[in-house]
Image (tube, rainbow, N blue to C red):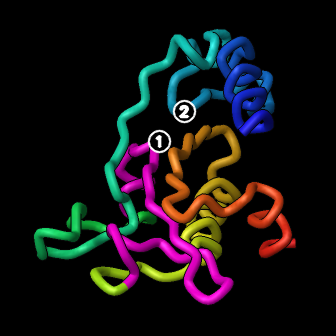
Amino acid sequence: MALSFITSLLLLVAPISAIVTPKDTACNGYPEFCSRLYSNVTLIGTHDSAFVGILPTENQLISVADQLSDGIRFLQAQTHNSSGTIELCHTSCLELNAGPLLTYLETVKTFLDNNPNEVVTFLVTNQDGIPVAGIFLLYS
């Protein structure tokens, strides 16, 4: 919790140019964003971004990769511990499981590798109260 709060606080006071490089290019598509504080940039986002389909439990019609390509820069997802793997599940993994958090993050990493001057913000809920240290152990 403390690490998350400190990271959030640092992002609020840091200009986006401190997050992305080089400074000569646009930040999230606009050169003027590079000098703005993170807290002074509005990002469009998707609720339950990993749940793609037409069912009521599926909130998006296009993939996370397509959401990012279309300009989404704020992604929200729900996580659950499923037998030691952090899964993206809608309310419970029995209801809808969009797969491992790691696969989801790899999709975002691919986008960021191809677009180094973009900033993507996450809101990831921790439905099962997995300790932050436990998350790092699972992915180290």
- Image-quadrant location for residue 93: bottom left
Q: CB of mark 1 within 8 Å of CB of mark 2? A: yes
Q: Can you say whether 134 is above or below 115 in the image?
A: below
How far apart, in angstroms, are the residues tagged by discs 1 and 2? 8 Å
Residue at the image position 61 percent from the left and 40 percent from the top: 118
Quarter of the image where one finds residue 92: bottom left
Instruction: Report the side of 3 relative to 65 (left or right).
Output: right
Q: Which residue is mark 1?
A: 73
Q: Quadrant of the N terminus?
A: top right
Dot 1 falls on a residue whose secondary structure is: loop
Q: Please tell me the numbered disc located at residue 28.
A: 2
Tell me the residue at 61%/75% (across/down): 86
Q: Is residue 77 above or below residue 51?
A: above
Image: 131 above or below 103: above
Q: Residue 107 sits in which quadrant? A: bottom right
**Which quadrant of the rendered structure holds the C terminus?**
bottom right
Residue 100: give x, y in percent of width and height: 56, 79
Q: Secondary structure at mark 2?
A: loop
Residue 89: where, in percent of width, then height?
41, 73
> Dot 2, crowdedness within 10 Å: few (<14), some or many (≥20)?
many
Counting from the top left corner in percent of width and height, residue 34 is at 65, 18
Q: Which region shows up in magenta?
A: 66-93
